[in-house]
Amino acid sequence: MALPAVLIIIVVGMIIASWIGGGVIATMIYYGLRIITPSLFLVTICLICGVVAFAIGSSWSTMGTIGVAGMGIGMSMGIAPAMVAGAVISGAYFGDKMSPLSDTTNMAAGVTGTNLFEHMTYMTIPGLVLALIVYFVLGRQFGGADVDEENIQGNLTALNSNFIISPWLMLVPVAIAVLVIMKVPALSALIVGVVLGFLCEIFVQGGNVGNAINALHDGYVMSSGNEMVDELFNRGGIESMMFTVSLVIFAMVFGGILEHTGMLQAIVKQILKVAKSAGSLIAATIVSAFFTNATASEQYISILLPGRMYAKAYQDKGLHPKNLSRALEDEGTELHHCLCGLY
């Protein structure tokens, strides 16, 4: 049952490495940094973080790199740190939730047997739109501030020195978006992304075939001299996903023990005495994911256990599996983010 999610997670590691090596992610960041203006800074940094998180499938990596740089730039313009942090977090979590490369997104879809692109939590879009409106209004008061050109230029120079930046490289994520719209199976679409990124690394960036192949396994490695750029781009590869894969396997083993010993059924039986309607079942799923995450402090467990607990109940009520997968990811991962943020 976990195998489809495991395969996708492995391919995700490959696509991250190939898109970094092919200059695709560098191009996204480069043009994002070029459009920063003080009055639109909050809106811009939110969108940049969303694009980067979407491209690499990781909110934490985005916040730890682009987010940190954005904090420095925003504070240099006199913008309150809390405002900048809010914009960074909003964009990073949105991109993570919408990314076909996100581990939790793939896991929630895989555990419930939902097509990845049907699972995508589009209900996060209204939240982002509202946030952007607020950031636009708040940002107008900083229209006369000066941009930290030195900081931005240092990042742009590092990107230009290590990658060939071209708007044509944006066709790679566009191609994946087209495949998503055409409802091509997730694994097939991601493999196409790997191939396109690999070809860009060879024919656009002038990379070595052997090094490009090694990067698919071990991850992309570079040394630009710019700490933020190095931290963001030294990642990817199959090896980088093995920790996540091992967690998925052990969590499924744990869930299998609970399921086949009858423990999960005993718990679900009591819950379903109260949760008789479709709405109350979804509410029970959310509460279960919340409780699991609050007690175990592990987002993978909070997706896997409730996913196995309620799979049959959703089927019996004629509910599409995407209702279960979306409830699991929205509550299971968001609470984890909130708890880590408080920490």
Image: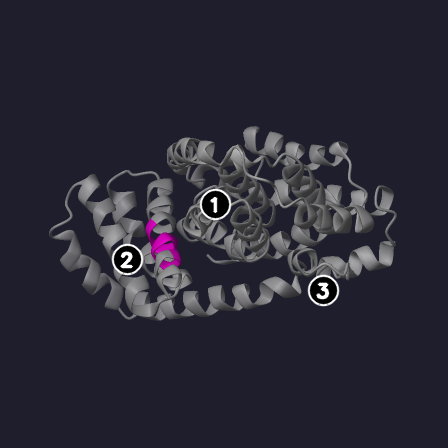
Q: Amino acid at mark 1?
A: Ile
- Compared across the picture, whether 249 is left or right of 339 comes to right
- Name which residue lies at 66% across and 52% down: 16
Kindly identify which residue carries mark 1.
79
Kindly identify which residue carries mark 3.
218
Earlier in the chain: of badge 1 and badge 3, it is: 1
Picture coordinates of residue 329, whole percent (x, y): 38, 50
**Relative vertical location of residue 256 with respect to residue 50 in this rendering, above or below:** below
Q: Amino acid at mark 2?
A: Phe
Structural distance between the alpha carbons of marks 2 and 1: 34 Å
- Compared across the picture, whether 129 is left or right of 58 comes to left
Q: Secondary structure at mark 3?
A: helix
Task: Report the disc number at residue 108.
Answer: none
**Relative vertical location of residue 253 with respect to residue 156 in this rendering, above or below:** below
Picture coordinates of residue 103, whole percent (x, y): 51, 54
Q: Secondary structure at mark 2?
A: helix
Residue 319 picture quarter? top left
Kindly identify which residue carries mark 2.
290
| Residue numbers of the magenta segment | 331-337
